Image (cartoon, rainbow, N blue to C red):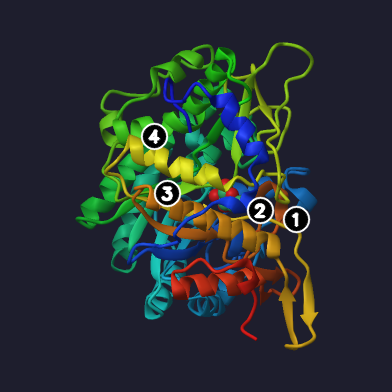
Amino acid sequence: MGGPGRWPADRGERSGRSEDRPVSTISTTGQFPDGFLWGTATAAYQIEGAAAEGGRGPSIWDTLCRVPGAVQGGDTGDVACDHYHRWAEDVDHLARLGVSAYRLSISWSRVQPGGSGPLNAEGVDFYRNLLDALRERGITPYVTLYHWDLPQELEDAGGWAARETAYAFADYARAMARELGDRVALWTTLNEPWCSAYLGYASGVHAPGRTEPAAALAAVHHLNLAHGLAVRAIREELPGAACSITLNLHVLRAASGSDADADAVRQIDGLANRVFLGPLLEGTYPADVQQDTASVSDWSFVHDGDLDVVRQPLDVLGVNYYSSTRVRRFDGEGEPVRADGHKTTAASPWVAADDVEFLPQPGPYTAMGWNVEPAGLTELLLDLHERYPDQPLAVTENGASFADEVVQDPALGIPRVHDIARVAYLRDHVAAVAAAIDAGADVRGYFAWSLMDNFEWAYGYSKRFGILHVDYPTGERTWKDSAYWYARLTRTGRIPAVFEAGPAA
Ligand code: FCB
């Protein structure tokens, strides 16, 4: 992240350094505080399947998956990992992994098919049983209420561009607090509202696939508002309930030390980071973002009193981190480069920022083409800590996609996945968290994305992020070497070496 005036003048130098820095030189004591949560994360649409079972209604992702060309390979979440039927087995895997927490999301259209009105008892029971099974195993449930799967009926009524959706979300949050309140340790309202707003309504890469920049800005605000209304509703139902939100904050690098590139960082930091952090944690929208986007919107969707609603005390701020982003002010020559890692289409997710270029970062890269830069995670956590010293943090997603292959282990007679690149990625990022803690950041937990391979949105099943491998035709789960490595980490609280990945001999 970077804010106006917050970045040192040596931006170019920083960028230069990241090019030569070998990934494995991060040093750390590797000590984690007592009670630090080790978890894995998933999301309902990506794993559940059973799209038309148990009274579930359609969501915007069911709809987008049916638009030709929208999702790679024409894949859908209809079956996904079949977690809806295999959840008990998945809880067994979590217990074997030794995690103390599991971050899951509730499918809104499974528990309230139309997004408003009566609840679907069968859907609520599904989560009740899952939460009970987790607690029986001593696994703390972190529940996200919205991981991108808006009930289609609400999109038909305007989606996140419509203010009413924020109120519908708060009603749903209240209903979940009432139904599941005694079973949930922490409520996360939204996952990555940046993606919901800009990929959903500006670039159209995500559901609902709209390319309307003004609607995207309205969605930003209505998501922020939805968060505030939901936190209030949850705490009205459950006084003292622990609440959070998860953001995908962008760690930004300027392409050079020029003022023009510093201003490009400022502009993108506004759209990516401060437009959420500002209202959520400080109760204000950044004036420069409103100025930058004045040609697109007058921001009249922000009503009097909204900002008081949006800003609610957060027990934890969730941070998802995968890679970093390099920007440059476009000089008007040729076509601007748009390698922002968010899948390039005709429309940009960056509202009113057509004169900002997104340059490829130095490698190494994961199968998503995302650069691997663990130091960016340390920097992000420390930057947040410096800005909001009293705000506890958690890394709610971090992980990597690589092309995995299942092979038979001749010695042990079991299937194996030798995902050493993922082990190295996880090790270096866990070390980056330890470094942030050593330097004073209040980080309460780390959640590996993901428990298992799953439906990776517009990429369908082509990208595997799991520490468990999923064979989609059969649904069979196989522990990758990274899962064995992670189990060692959760049991010892010590960062195992890469060679310690794999089953005990
Ligand atoms: C995040 C999403 C998560 C997953 C990872 C790879 O942006 O929250 O669902 O797709 O990226």
Foreground mark, 1 or 3, reads 3
Residue ID for mark 2: 456
Q: Amino acid at mark 3?
A: Ala
Residue 165 at x, y percent in the picture: 43, 39
Foreground mark, 2 or 3, reads 3
- Taking the image as drawn, is residue 59 in sight? no
User: How far is mark 1 from mark 3, CA to CA?
Assistant: 33 Å
User: CB of residue at label 2: within 8 Å of ligand 1?
Assistant: yes
Residue 478, compared with residue 429, is above or below; it is below
Between disc 3 and disc 4, whose residue precedes? 4
Residue 42 at x, y percent in the picture: 54, 60
Residue ID for mark 4: 277
Q: Amino acid at mark 4?
A: Leu
User: How far is mark 2 from mark 1, CA to CA?
Assistant: 7 Å
Residue ID for mark 3: 436
Between disc 1 and disc 3, whose residue precedes? 3
Secondary element under disc 3, as helix, strand or loop, is helix
User: Looking at the image, do the residues carrying marks 2 and 1 touch, with CB atoms under 8 Å apart?
Assistant: yes
Between disc 2 and disc 1, whose residue precedes? 2
Please give left or right for residue 207 compared with residue 289 in the image: right
Between disc 4 and disc 1, whose residue precedes? 4
User: Looking at the image, do the residues carrying marks 1 and 3 touch, with CB atoms under 8 Å apart?
Assistant: no
Mark 4 crowd level (few <14, some 14–19, many ≥20, 10 Å Cα) = many
Foreground mark, 4 or 2, reads 4
User: How far is mark 4 from mark 2, CA to CA?
Assistant: 26 Å
Residue ID for mark 1: 462
